[in-house]
Image: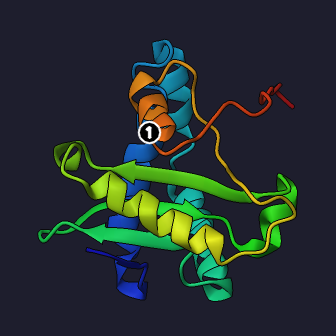
Amino acid sequence: MVRPYADGDGDALWALKRGFETGLGEGTGDDQKQAVYEAKLDADYRREWLEWVDRCVAEDERCVQVADGGDGLAGYVFVLPESMAFVWDAAVLNEIYVEPEHRGTGVADDLMDAALDAAREQSPPLDRIVLDVDRENERARAFYERYGFEHWGELVARDL
């Protein structure tokens, strides 16, 4: 069951966020990449990230939705609020994550459907939804391709 994030979900959502962040470096780079993602997950980042979640949810409760796995949260999806759509001229799927033990059970599909429904209610400058995915993450790329996502530009980055 997918539902909007609620006040009492903070600890469980943070546990999922940690899984999302540490999973970014897992299998898609060397140990240094994973260490970089893990290093930022301190108490200050936790507090700031959860405060940002609260601000986004205050703007649109469907920005962050969670999948209840019966024994706790099984995953979450985070669509940036409409006010941030001008960042990419589109709705933005910021994060989607499913606990490993719930993968292959349909939870990811339920979360993606919820994300697309939330995005369709927005009025982005371009009628599309975008996301960032690591080229080396074959599982994620296959999932997004199944939903009709196609390559659109290329994100590049540099250290500040």
Three-letter amino acid code at the position of disc 1: Arg
Q: Is residue 52 visible?
A: no
Vertical position of residue 90 compared to residue 59: above or below: above
Outermost residue toward the left? 71
**What residue is shown at x 43% (from left), y 86% (from top)?**
7
Vertical position of residue 88 compared to residue 70: above or below: above
**Callout 1 secondary element:** helix
**What residue is shown at x 23% (from left), y 42% (from top)?**
100
Q: Position of residue 29 (x, y in %)?
A: 51, 15
Q: Image quarter for residue 89? A: bottom right
Q: Image quarter for residue 52? A: bottom right
Which residue position is annotated with label 1? 146
- Decide if residue 159 is on the left or right side of residue 56: right
Outermost residue toward the top? 30
Q: Residues within 10 Å of mark 1 (few under 14, many from 20)?
A: few
**What residue is shown at x 43% (from left), y 45% (from top)?**
20
Q: Please state, as top left, top right, bottom left or bottom right, where the C terminus lies in the image.
A: top right
- Please tell me which residue lies in front, 107 or 55: 107
Q: Please state, as top left, top right, bottom left or bottom right, where the N terminus lies in the image.
A: bottom left
Q: Position of residue 43 (x, y in %)?
A: 51, 58
**What residue is shown at x 87% (from left), y 64% (from top)?**
125
- Please tell me which residue lies in front, 62 or 26: 62
